[in-house]
Amino acid sequence: MNKTHPDNMPVFFIQHNDEEFISGTPLWEIHSLIVPHEGDIVIQKHTSDSFHKTELLEKLVSKQSQNLIVVGNQNEYYTDATILHAFSLGDHVTLIKDVHRTWNSNILAAQ
């Protein structure tokens, strides 16, 4: 199936790396239902903030992207930190309902 993005909208995948999500392991892999397509940008990160010590800002600037549509995992860490950083840069952020999530932790109950 050939999938295209509306209006040639750039798509960024941010892939987390740490002691649990180890590069090359099944838990680290991007799920097959949302696998990047040709031209999509995959960025590796090592902290909650997708901008911190990554090339995300550089890539967004090169694509002239200031209106971000965010989906994600672990809202209380990754999604939150990234959105707050984007706002501090003056970007407009839209968080899409029902395509972000978390799981139970000491900080937040998933419901």
Image (spheres, rainbow, N blue to C red):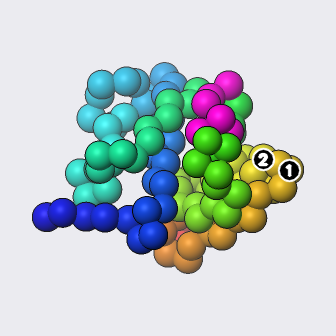
How crowded is the residue under tag 2: few (<14 C-alpha within 10 Å), some, or many (20+)? some
Q: Check residue 106 in the rendering and tell me which mark sits there, or answer none.
A: none
Chain part drawn in magenta:
53-59
From this view, report whether residue 75 is shown above or below residue 60: below
Q: Which part of the image, by quadrant, shows the C terminus?
A: bottom right
Question: Disc 1 marks which amino acid?
Answer: Ser
Q: Which part of the image, by quadrant, shows the N terminus?
A: bottom left
How crowded is the residue under tag 1: few (<14 C-alpha within 10 Å), some, or many (20+)? few
Total numbered labels placed on residues in the image: 2
Name the residue tied to disc 1: 88
Are the two marked residues, 2 and 1, in contact with CB atoms closer than 8 angstroms? yes
Name the residue tied to disc 2: 85
User: In the rendering, at what x and y percent does residue 39 appear?
Assistant: 36, 45
Q: CA distance from mark 2 to mark 1?
A: 5 Å
Task: Please name the residue shown 66% across and 70% down the image.
Answer: 94
From this view, report whether residue 23 is shown above or below residue 61: above
Question: Disc 2 marks which amino acid?
Answer: His
Task: Please name the residue shown 50% across and 42% down the image.
Answer: 14
Task: Please name the residue shown 27% across and 35% down the image.
Answer: 26
**Furthest residue to the bottom?**
97
Q: Residue 58 colored magenta?
A: yes
Q: Could you tell me which secondary element the residue under label 1 belongs to?
A: helix
User: In the rendering, at what x and y percent does residue 97 appear?
Assistant: 55, 77
From this view, report whether residue 97 is shown above or below residue 23: below
User: Front-most of 78 and 39?
Assistant: 39
Can I make out residue 77 in this image? no
Q: Residue 18 colored magenta?
A: no
Task: Please name the residue shown 50% across and 35% down the image.
Answer: 43
